[in-house]
Image (cartoon, grey):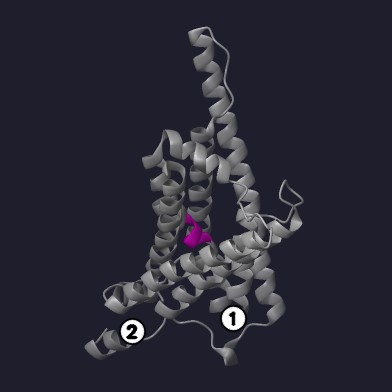
Amino acid sequence: MTAADQERAATSPPRNAGPSARVPLRSALGAFAWDVCLIVALMIAFIVLLTLLWAMASGVRAAMQGGVAQPAGAVAQLALIVLASAGVAWLLYAFRRPATAGEKFHSRAMARRPRTWWLAAGVGAGMFLLITLATFASRQLGLVPDPSNQALIREIWQSHPLLLALFVVVLAPLYEEVLFRRVLFGRLWAQGWPVLGLWLSGLAFACAHELPSLGRHGLANSLLLMGLYTLLGVAFAWVYRRTGTLAAPIVAHGLNNALALGVMALSLNG
């Protein structure tokens, strides 16, 4: 590759289909749906397998100590989620959406640009502020937009704050960006449907965090949470498309989570 070619690669986004090269929408949606089904099926398989392994190990340990096997605690549940999600992310990346040499080159080039990190930081902090304001406004209207995993998160924070911070700020952004931005959004982006990809991958991101339900806070709160998570997913996908490097939405995601965790910590310790 000549110096001129390298300069063009560093200043151009990864090679993706333009409007004139779009694949048919039906085919694009079919591939997207297949990726979603694979994610769901693999997550279930990983969680079942890891749960069985944990139960067997716990049973053996209890038998050796003459006690009774205990159910999985909060930390064990978190570990299962991390291992299952990381395994699924690696498999989908390796076999469905591996990066080409050109994409890797472009990603490294964009990572050397300060603008990439200013954009990532701005979106991460901006989305945190937007969601904080939306949450405050919704509470004034009588809604209770509390995520369903909030009790688990708070329990782990009380006993293992560093472990929780590692999960929330580093691990979750890593595997979630691979799954939802690289695999799901990247699929439709590469096939010439980036705007559709923004919203569908954002909706998938929301469903992974908060499915519609009539839980203890009602359907309205569930739908509000889904809307907020969808906006987060759209924002992170936009950062990925704007920069062409997955590192940017990972940083934006991690910063957003770090700020949310900091606010939660202040509220619990205040």
> Closer to the camera, 183 or 77?
77
| Image-based side of 129 in relation to 112, left or right | right
Give the overall secondary structure of the magenta segment: helix
- Tag 2: residue type? Ala
Please, what secondary structure does the residue beneath circle 1 have? helix
Residue drawn at point x = 31 percent, y = 79 percent: 115
> Closer to the camera, 252 or 24?
252
Q: Is residue 211 above or below residue 107?
A: above
Q: CA distance from mark 2 to mark 1?
A: 23 Å
The image position of residue 39, as x and y in percent, is 61, 55
Check disc 2 and report the residue beneath it: 9
Q: Earlier in the sequence, mark 2 or mark 1?
A: 2
Please, what secondary structure does the residue beneath circle 2 have? helix
Q: Residues within 10 Å of mark 1 (few under 14, many from 20)?
A: some
| Image-based side of 221 in relation to 160, left or right | right
Q: Which mark is residue 77?
A: none
Do residues under tags 2 and 1 come within 8 Å of each other at their CB atoms? no
> Closer to the camera, 98 or 167?
167
- Quadrant where the C terminus sits is top left
Residue drawn at point x = 41 percent, y = 76 percent: 244
The reply to whether residue 113 is visible in this rendering is no
Asked if the magenta segment contains residue 177, the reply would be: yes
Asked if the magenta segment contains residue 148, the reply would be: no
Q: Residue furthest top?
A: 66
- Quadrant where the N terminus sits is bottom left
The image position of residue 235, as x and y in percent, is 51, 72
Q: Which mark is residue 195?
A: 1
Magenta residue span: 175-179
Residue drawn at point x = 38 percent, y = 86 percent: 12
The reply to whether residue 47 is visible in this rendering is yes
The image position of residue 189, as x and y in percent, is 55, 78
- Tag 1: residue type? Val
